[in-house]
Amino acid sequence: MSTDLFSKQANLYSRYRPQYPEKLYKFLMLHCIHKELAWDCATGNGQAAVDLAKFFRKVIATDLSEKQIKSAVKVSNVDYRVLKAEESLDVQDHSIDLITVAQALHWFDLDKFYAEVTRLLRPAGLFATWAYAFHAPIHPKIDLILNDFYFNTLGPFWSKNNKLIFDDYRKLNFPFREIPTPEINLEVDWSLEDLIGYFKTWSSTQLFIDKNQVDPTIELHEKISAHWGKDDEKKVLSWHLVFKVGKVY
């Protein structure tokens, strides 16, 4: 990931990005033979790294954004480092049991990153990546407003990288011996403030603000609030996780 699109909203990221479900980690631990060392690449504020630390003796968590690393939750067995995904990680070859990339693989130079994965994974090690795009419908009137926001307001600001997620990573190069994964949904119980805060973390939203000097989520909040109820009223939101796991051939 040669371009840093997330430092600007690092604090928002740590506040409004949802945590990943326990079912995902249970699946990984079932298939991960050794649990000595894990690497969470493009860790952001350490969401996945902190969860992995419950299972591994040590977790290395890297991100190109120094601001994201500074905002990460500190855990004794998580070693945070500022590093691009494609740069060489300073550990011994074939020494890592699990490499994970959450909500970020579509930004990488895949050939360079996959070369690192191949170099670093133990023979029985796993590479896992997961991502999510748009949540399931909430309410017909709210959904119409959100679809207009996604595809018209932000439409010009979605990159080809984002569109890999929209297609459930079907066009993503994945040169590993793939392991079938279960269907997993990510669910949260959110207020309208939470939802709007989440939209502010998007790279497309930040690119819109940079170009227009206007925050589009302000108008979005006004439109949705008429159909949401009280702003602090909670609604269940659900995303389908694209979840791919593989081993080096």
Image (tube, rainbow, N blue to C red):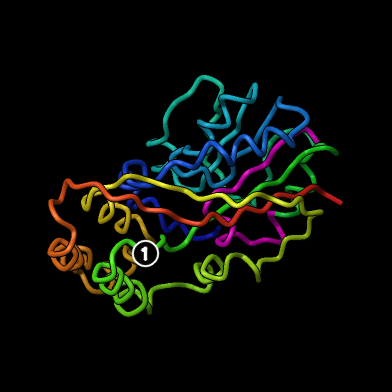
Outermost residue toward the front in this view: 140
Q: Quadrant of residue 124?
A: top right
Q: Which residue is mark 1?
A: 137
190 relative to 66 in the view: left or right: left
**SS for tag 1?**
loop
Instruction: Find residue 81 and report its horizontal and vertical position in percent.
Output: 54, 36
Q: Percent from the top left, x then y, of residue 109?
A: 64, 62
Q: Quadrant of residue 229?
A: bottom left
Classify 10 Å Cα crowding around label 1: few (below 14), some (14-19), many (20 and above): some
Relative placement, left or right, of 19 versus 11 is right
Residue at left offset 20%, top offset 67%: 220
Is residue 79 found inside the magenta-colored segment of the image? no
Residue occupying image coordinates x 67% and y 61%: 110
Residue shown at the point (79%, 45%) measured from the top left = 119
Nearest the viewer among 17 and 139 is: 139
- The image shows residue 176 at horizontal and vertical percentages of 79, 55
- In the picture, residue 105 is in which quadrant? bottom right
**Left or right placement of residue 104 versus residue 151 in this view:** right
Span shown in magenta: 94-113
Q: Is residue 78 left or right of residue 29?
A: left
Q: Position of residue 63 (x, y in %)?
A: 52, 44
